[in-house]
Amino acid sequence: MNKFVVFASVCCVLLAGKMVLTAPQGSPDAAVAPRSAAQDVQTVRYYSENNGLDGYKFTYELSDGQIRSEVGTYRDTKDAEGNIVKTLFVQGSYSFVGPDGQTYWVNYTADENGYHPKVGTGPTGGIQAGQDAPIEGAAGSA
């Protein structure tokens, strides 16, 4: 079994190398092409806190309208044998403006039972500028 894993890994590396070497090259003018709007995106707000086993939270907003905020906390749950174990519970939200100008958003929770998103479009229902998770109305929140 170990020999197969090594063989498969070597094949993947060789295939990736061949793809890189045979990829089409950009034009000489590509290095001086004008910058796109995506390259001009700036961070408007950023906050991050990691408290180890007490959890974490972060938020960022970008000048192109992207916003993401998430809070993670540990809760006591029971495993299959009935033992108490720590489980990460996550609440968060993100939104972005699509190429069509529409705002798309996702509010979510994630726990021992999986990922639970609530998705939508429009200016309301998702995270707003200046807001932090947890978002009222997020999947699984009260």
Image: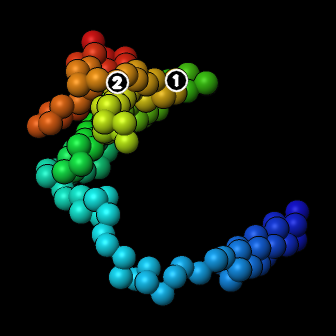
* Front position in the image: 100 or 142: 100
Quarter of the picture containing the N terminus is bottom right
Residue named by callout 2: 121
Query: Residue at point 61% right, 24% down?
Result: 80
Q: Where is residue 106, by image quadrant?
A: top left
In the depicted structure, whether residue 47 falls above or below residue 101? below
Numbered mark located on residue 51 in the image: none
The x, y position of residue 83, in whole percent, is: 52, 27
Graded by Cα atoms within 10 Å as few (under 14), some (14 to 19) or many (20 or more), the crowding at tag 2 reads some
Query: Which residue type carries mark 1?
Result: Asn
Query: Residue at point 31% right, 44% down?
Result: 53
Numbered mark located on residue 113 in the image: 1
* Front position in the image: 74 or 139: 139
Q: Is residue 112 visible?
A: no
The x, y position of residue 130, in whole percent, is: 11, 37
Query: Residue at point 52% right, 23% down?
Result: 113
In the depicted structure, whether residue 96 falls above or below residue 36? above
Could you tell whether 49 is left or right of 83 in the image? left
Which is nearer the N-term, disc 1 or disc 2?
1
